[in-house]
Image (cartoon, grey):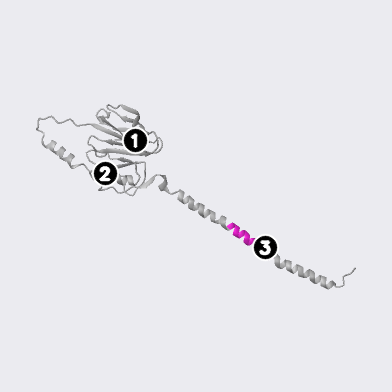
Amino acid sequence: MTSPHPHKATRRGWRSLCRLVVVLPLALAAAGCGQSSAVTPDSAAPASATAASTTTADPARFGYAIMPDLTGLTGEQASQALRRADFHYIDYSQNRNATMSSRVVSQNPAPGTRWNKLDKVSVALAPSTAASTARTTVAAAPTTTQAPEPVSDTWTYKVTGPHKAMITYAAKGGNTSQVSSAKLPWSKSVESPGYASMSFAYVSAQNSGGGTISCQIIAPSGNVVSENSSEGEYAIVTCQS
């Protein structure tokens, strides 16, 4: 049976096709916007990851610090400045005639150097006036018949910490002695450690638990010529001169 209005059916078909042409691009555009907004959080992720990587790579966290200027400070003031900067191994053995009240005349490494906190810092102090005067007096009076007083060669080791420690140290005549479980604080005076006429003072200690363990070597003059510290479970600390 033939439709009584063929032209009306044709018009309805054209209208449906036009609607499809208009609606389809709008739907595709909306889908594209949704995908763009979904990608935005991921695109920000590399920036935060880069920032985290930069923070982790900070060299100060790997045991380095800037060396302070010690020139003109006393030995005591230099020790305090180095400990504030978190340096642990300080060596004063370059001049045994100086006292800790003497002034710093040189240091290694130089001020401003970026230095490992566990490496040795060498500090040279000016000779004390008393020691210089004593040497001058003896030189000016060679005619005396009185025998000179024997020079003491007694060195003192000290170890401090919160627990007991196993301690090894250089004894008289180049021998080595050990204390298996020393109660801290611990000290020991040793006469003429080393070999023949060469003095060699040495002490090493291992912590029996956590916390900080420290050592010192005091020369016959009464000056601290070496000090060091370590921290952690069963940590080992060593001083030598």
Pointer 2: residues within 10 angstroms few (<14), some, or many (20+)? some
Magenta span covers which residues? 25-39
Q: Nearer the viewer, mark 1 or mark 2?
A: 2
Crowd band around label 1 with a 10 angstrom C-alpha radius: few (<14), some (14–19), many (20+): many
Q: Residue at x 68, y 65 (%)?
A: 25
* Left or right for 95, reference 1: left
Residue 229 is situated, as x and y percent measured from the top left of the image, at: 34, 39
**Quadrant housing residue 225:** top left
Q: Characterize the magenta stretch by its predominant secondary structure.
A: helix
Upstream in the sequence, badge 1 or badge 2? Answer: 2
> Which quadrant, please, contains the N terminus?
bottom right
- The residue at 73%/68% (across/down) is 19
Whether 180 is drawn above or below 53: the answer is: above
Query: For the point 32% across and 27% down, which residue is it?
Result: 177
Task: Identify the mark at residue 28; answer none if there is no mark.
Answer: 3
Q: Amino acid at mark 1?
A: Thr
Q: CA distance from mark 3 to mark 2?
A: 78 Å
Mark positioned earlier in the residue sequence (3 or 1): 3
Circle 1: element type? strand
Residue 116 vertical position relative to residue 5 in the rendered view, above or below: above
